[in-house]
Image: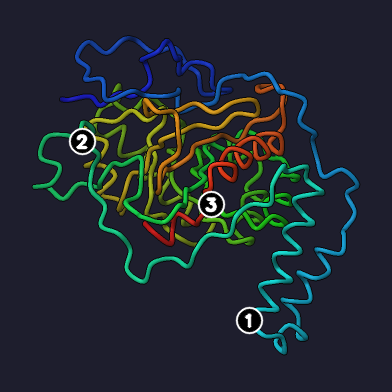
């Protein structure tokens, strides 16, 4: 069985993920795919003085304007005035949360979603012939948009929910049940704010080390669990650590997974790590981060958002909603 592994180049370890870094025996037969950037689980990173929380914790004029747009009076406003007021609210939120620049607004999503294919070097035998879900790190688009994804569910910071809602930054979550079950309600609040909840397995195990039956239980069990808890069976799945083999994709297909998005860059509170040699963003890149807090990062989730948004905005990109394209 061919193993597709992405986490062991450049001395990066997968065993520093809080609660999921179990020791694993080495896999004798492995195929390393191109330039893996990170563990697929966050590593501790030193915080560089970013401020946590929202500062005052009080609502500013920008939020009032945002509510006006959404309220009954907003129905009487022209599209241009609505856009102006929404941008003013976002600028006010950016100041409150300590962002260097106001996040750019993503263009309207495509009417027809782009065709997804597996990235070269990430294929498994028979992938196309058997119709297995495509594995990719970048969505094929021309617009300067990227996609923010957050994995596992260890940290449940209410400030993250408030920050992302006020800033109107879209993101997608890939959840592991053994962490999420500590507080299913937190992720229901997230879903209620428009965040899509996707599959990151029940127990965050190293899938290529499991039998097909074990892998199917990890993947399909979490599909069923998310559907039960949150009312929708997720179409997207991300394997723990970014590691998979053909059994992984076959199992994922049997329980309704349509695509397997990995990542092109990873965000921490004090740095970015890159898959590509140019250490830059590209249209359609998927950015990974994790639900982590000061116990692991020595920084908060708002610190991480400030860092990643500084990079994304300064390089002329907007964050778009992954599900509008995939």
User: In front here: 185 or 159?
Assistant: 159
Q: Earlier in the sequence, mark 3 or mark 1?
A: 1
Marks 1 and 2: in contact by CB < 8 Å?
A: no
Q: Nearer the viewer, mark 3 or mark 1?
A: 1
Q: Position of residue 315 (x, y in %)?
A: 53, 42
Few, some or many residues within 10 Å of mark 3 (<14, 14–19, 20+): many
Image coloring type? rainbow
User: Rounded to the nearest whole Å, what is the CA distance between mark 2 and mark 1?
Assistant: 43 Å
Q: Residues within 10 Å of mark 2 (few under 14, many from 20)?
A: few
Determine which residue is flagged by label 2: 120
Q: How far across and how far down the image is residue 26, in percent?
A: 31, 10
| Residue 170 image offset from top left, x and y in percent | 57, 54
Q: CA distance from mark 3 to mark 2?
A: 25 Å
For the residue pair 201 and 14, the one nearer the viewer reads as 14
Q: Which residue is labeled 3 in the image?
A: 319
Q: Where 201 falls versus 171 (above or below)?
A: above
User: What element does badge 1 sit on?
Assistant: helix
Q: Where's residue 162, x and y in %? A: 74, 52
Query: Which element is circle 3 on?
Result: strand
Which image quadrant for residue 306? top right
The residue located at (25%, 57%) in the rendering is 115
306 horizontally vs 172: left or right: right
Residue corresponding to mark 1: 79
Q: Residue at x 30, y 23 (%)?
A: 5
Give 229 or 144, whichever is nearer the viewer.
144
Residue at 72%, 76% in the rendered image: 70
- Give the label, 2 or 1, closer to the camera: 1
Going from N to C along the chain, the mark reached first, 2 or 1, is: 1
Mark 3 touches mark 1? (CB < 8 Å): no
Mark found first going from the N terminus, 3 or 2: 2
């Amino acid at each position: 069985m061919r193993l597709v592994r992405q986490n062991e180049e450049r001395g990066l370890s997968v065993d520093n993920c809080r609660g999921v870094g179990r020791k694993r025996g080495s896999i004798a037969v492995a195929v390393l795919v191109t330039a893996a950037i990170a563990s697929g689980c966050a590593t501790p990173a030193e915080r560089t003085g970013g401020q946590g929380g929202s500062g005052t914790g009080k609502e500013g004029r920008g939020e009032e304007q945002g509510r006006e747009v959404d309220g009954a009076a907003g129905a009487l406003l022209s599209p241009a005035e609505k856009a102006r007021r929404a941008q003013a609210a976002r600028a006010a939120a950016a100041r409150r949360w300590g962002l260097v620049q106001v996040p750019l607004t993503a263009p309207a999503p495509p009417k027809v979603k782009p065709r997804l294919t597996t990235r070269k070097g990430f294929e498994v035998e028979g992938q196309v012939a058997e119709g297995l879900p495509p594995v990719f790190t970048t969505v094929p688009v021309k617009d300067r948009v990227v996609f923010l994804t957050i994995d596992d569910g260890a940290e449940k910071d209410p400030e993250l929910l408030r920050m992302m809602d006020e800033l109107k930054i879209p993101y997608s979550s890939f959840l592991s049940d053994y962490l999420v079950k500590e507080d299913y309600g937190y992720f229901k609040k997230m879903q209620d704010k428009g965040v899509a909840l996707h599959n990151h397995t029940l127990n965050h195990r190293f899938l290529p080390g499991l039998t097909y039956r074990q892998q199917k239980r990890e993947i399909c069990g979490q599909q069923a669990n998310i559907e039960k808890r949150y009312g929708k069976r997720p179409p997207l799945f991300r394997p723990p650590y970014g590691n998979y083999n053909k059994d992984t994709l076959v199992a994922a297909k049997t329980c309704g997974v349509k695509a397997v998005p990995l990542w092109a860059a990873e965000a921490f509170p004090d740095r970015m790590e890159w898959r590509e040699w140019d250490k830059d963003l590209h249209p359609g890149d998927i950015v990974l981060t994790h639900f982590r807090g000061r116990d692991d990062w020595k920084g908060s989730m708002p610190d991480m958002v400030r860092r990643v948004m500084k990079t994304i905005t300064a390089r002329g990109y907007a964050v778009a909603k992954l599900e509008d394209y995939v």
